[in-house]
Image: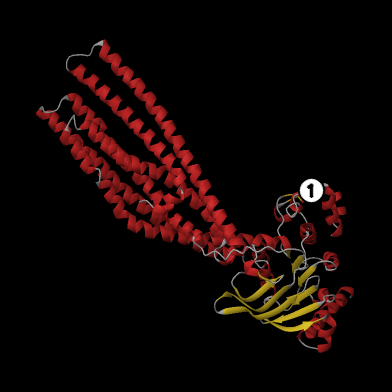
Amino acid sequence: MIKTRLIRLLKGSGKYIGYQVFWQWCALLAQIAVVTALCGLFGHMADGGADAEQIASAAAVLALGLLVRFVSDRMAARASYLASADVKRVLREKIYEKLLRLGTSYQEQIATSEVVQLSTEGVEQLETYFGKYLPQLFYSLLAPVTLFLVLKRVSFRASLILLLCVPLIPLSIVAVQKFAKKLLSKYWSIYAGLGDSFLENLQGLTTLKIYQADEKKAQEMDEESQHFRRITMKVLTMQLNSTSVMDIVAYGGAAVGMITACREFLRGSLGLTGALTIVLLAAEFFLPLRLLGSFFHIAMNGMAASDKIFRLLDLEEPDQGTKVLEGDLLNIELKDVHFSYEKDREILKGIDLALPSGTFVSIVGVSGCGKSTIAGILTGRNRHYSGAVTIAGMELRDISEASLQQKITLVRHNSYLFTGTVAENLRMAKPTASDAELKAVLEKVNLLGFLEEQEGLSTKLAEGGSNLSGGQRQRLAIARALLHDTPVYLFDEAASNIDAESEELIMEVVRELAKDRTVLLISHRLFNVIPSDCIYMMKDGVIAEKGTHQELMARGGEYAMLYESQRALEEYGKEGVQA
């Protein structure tokens, strides 16, 4: 069971497999020497006694053989470790490089949870395949031949019988392989599905608690876990049954060889020394293959994992643009843009939108109308669109992702903050930024005073910035975006789900930024978009209206109705608070 593509991918690990086989072979030769010396000594003793020279010679061979065996085992273990380490490094590098080539749009083709599983459990399974199974496979072919060449001079018949019984173990392995491959493929599919559910439920645990839906999700997880338990038990049952078959074949074959040697001894055609040598070494014909059978099931799991890994590595990569955006005057234009996450459900239905350099443009509309999809397209996350998207006259697909990220900064309502200090999070946007620059952007978002009451730039952040309030987290994300200092900024609901004070502070920063940058603001709250140079009102995936706030209000269409309804709700809320 050798997958040639896998071998080619990890050809650098081949030398460690060779080292391991060599040292295992050295250990076998040492064992043969020890057994031969001891059996010779017993033979002399049975014939009337052994002199001091014969005893000393046997003792020397025993000591040297044990030393060689010890050194060989240690070196084989080291070679196995080096092969395993090399496999993990290479595979994880390949997966990482593939994700880089897929770019920010990789989630269109594969779930993040599956990538994590393949990078961890999948790679670990292949570590065993290279570090244990393949070396054992080659050694299992070499050991019986070596033993036959040594023992045929003792008893050709017994050694030939032992050699002929050896292929019975590989035949039993082949018989199991077809069934095992199908079963393990199903196992990995269920395992990946369980991982998806677990990650999703873990990320949404707070929401589940709020709506008291955690018990229902727990029941669903229990059902999935039971399904996974059943398939796991089937895998273990298959492994146990095949192991039992291999034990019968291995020890049965050794027994046949031993019986043949004993019969020759009783007939007088084989001496005591030869009979003892064959009896003691008969099991060595089969033990390497028996151990190979144990590794076989892990290797089969590795093969199933490798299929998943190759599916990832074979994912179609988007055309990598090579053009570089120059300067800060970047006119952005969308013409007849269509986009679908699913084939039967179109999200954008022919969008025409202009974002001239140095302007403040907003996109508004009810939830689900396609606003955030446009931001995903402009940042390269949503690649499979039709129509034309141009930046500075260049088609978006032709622009390199690195250049795009250097010119456009996206700020979302859930921009992530990492565990570490405030300074470390800010310097992701500009690694060379001085403390003075960091403090300047914090001052702009009104966070500097609060942080100086803590530990300043060294203030520690918990996972996701959970030790800050929602408004503080968002303002820190805005500060990081300001430090990135790009000519174009996209704010996708950047002021949602936070308190009114933080929202006003953020909108003040956005309005200030719009004075000398190109800003696209996506907002559900129409009050925030009033100063925009142009507002696009979206409905059901199309541009329903466009114009300034005053023009849209005078028109009395969709925008005006939505604005008036929001204002009425806000005034009603204020009256309720005053009452």
Comparing 471 with 354, the one in front is: 354
Is the image coloured rainbow, by chain, by secondary structure, or in one colour? secondary structure
- Residue 234 falls in which quadrant of the image? bottom left
Instruction: Where is residue 424? Give x, y as percent.
Output: 74, 49
Residue 451, placed above or below residue 526: above
Residue in the picture at 76% in, 66% down: 488
Residue 151, placed above or below residue 93: above
Instruction: Where is residue 476? Give x, y as percent.
Output: 79, 57
Give the mark count: 1
- Residue extending farthest top: 52
Amino acid type, label 1 = Thr
Residue in the picture at 49% in, 48% down: 124
Residue beneath disc 1: 459
Q: Is residue 420 left or right of residue 187?
A: right
**Residue 225 visible, this orientation:** no
Residue 158, placed above or below residue 92: above
Residue in the picture at 37% in, 51% down: 2
Q: Quadrant of the C terminus?
A: bottom right
Secondary structure of the residue carrying tag 1 is loop
Comparing 180 with 362, the one in front is: 362
Q: Is residue 179 left or right of residue 272?
A: right
